[in-house]
Image (cartoon, rainbow, N blue to C red):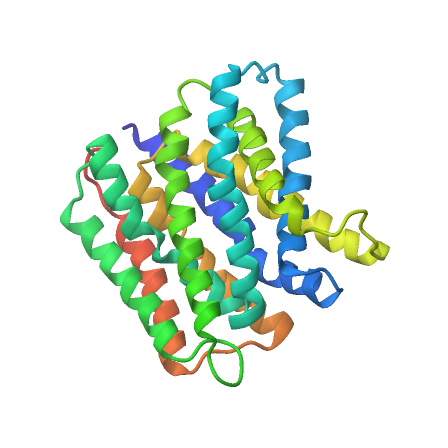
Amino acid sequence: MRTGGSASGYAWILSAAFLWSLLGPLSKFCLQAGAGPLETAFWRAGLGCALFFLHAWFTGALRVRPRHALIFMAFGVWGVGVFFGAMQYAIKLSGGATAVVLLYTAPVWVAVFSRLLFRERITGRKAAAILTALAGTALVCLSGGSLRGEPSALGIACGLLAGLCYATHYPFYRWWQPRYSTAAIYAFMLLGGILALAPWTPLPPHHAPATWGWLSALGLLTCYLAYICYGQGLQRISLVRAAVTCHLEPVLGTLWCWLFWDESFPPAGWLGGALVLAAVILLSTDGSRE
C-alpha cells in the first residue's frame, strides 16, 4: 500500500475517532434532557439514516439490489439496533467514559474476523498493539469505572456487547465495500436498526427544541459524519489498523466526560487510557505491508 494512501487512511480514521468520542457527552445531554436510552439510540440512527439516504440519492449511489438491501437491513438489526441500544444503556449505567472504553474490546474480534475472512496477517507489532489496548481496557474496568458509587455489572455487560457489535462492522463493511458506497450501505443498515428500535420508542415524540438539538448533533456528528470518515479510512488501511487506531476515541471520550460531566477514573483507570493511546502509537509506526 502506498505511503500516501496509508497516511490519509489514518487521517480519516482519526477523524472518525474524534467524532465518535463525542458520543458519550452528547448522549448524556440527551438522557439528561429526558430521552430514554433506546429512544436516544433510535433518533441517532434515524437522523443518520435520513442523511445517508439523501447522500446516496444526490450522488447516484442508491441503486442497491433488493436482496442486498435486505441483507444490509438484517445486519442493521444487530449492528445498529443492538449496538446503539447497548451503548446507550452502558452510558447511562456505567458512565460515558467507561462505556466508550469498553467499546474498544472490538480489536480482538476484528483481528479474528479479518484473519478468518480476509487472511490479513497479524504481525508482532499489531499483536502487541492489540494486547496493549486490551490491557488498558481491563484496567479501566477493574478500576471501578467513571461514575461514583458501585460499578454496574449490567452497564459493563452492555459496554462489552457494544464492543462485539462494533467489531462486526469492520468485516461486514469491507465485504460489501467494493460493490456499494458507504452512504448506500449505511442507509439501509441504519434503516434496519430503526425498525428494530421503533417498538421501544414513544411515537410521536414530545421533546423541547434543546433536546432535538442534542439529538440532531448526535445523529449528524457521531453517526453520519463519523461513518463517512470511517468508510474512507477503510478504503486505505487494513481492518486491524483501523480498529486499533480508533482507540484514540476512548482517550478523547474520557476527556470530554471529565470536562463536561466531571466523570473521572482512579489512577488505574487513567493508566488504562494511557495504554490505549500507546497502542495507537505502536500501530501507526508499523511499516509492514498490507
Residue nearest the viewer, comparing 162 with 216:
162
- Does residue 3 show up? yes
Residue plotted at (36% across, 47% down)? 243
Quadrant housing residue 235: top left
Q: Check the picture and name the quadrant holding the C terminus.
A: top left
Q: Position of residue 157 (x, y in %)?
A: 42, 65
Residue plotted at (61% across, 14% down)? 60
Residue plotted at (45% across, 76% down)? 145
Left or right of residue 160: residue 224: right
Quadrant housing residue 91: bottom right
Furthest residue toward left: 124
In the picture shown, does residue 129 fall above or below 60?
A: below
Left or right of residue 13: residue 214: right
Q: Position of residue 161 (x, y in %)?
A: 41, 56
Q: Position of residue 212 (x, y in %)?
A: 78, 52
Q: Check the picture and name the quadrant holding the N terminus.
A: top left
- Does residue 284 show up? no
Q: Position of residue 214 (x, y in %)?
A: 73, 55
Furthest residue toward front: 199
Residue plotted at (52% across, 85% down)? 149
Q: How many marks?
A: 0
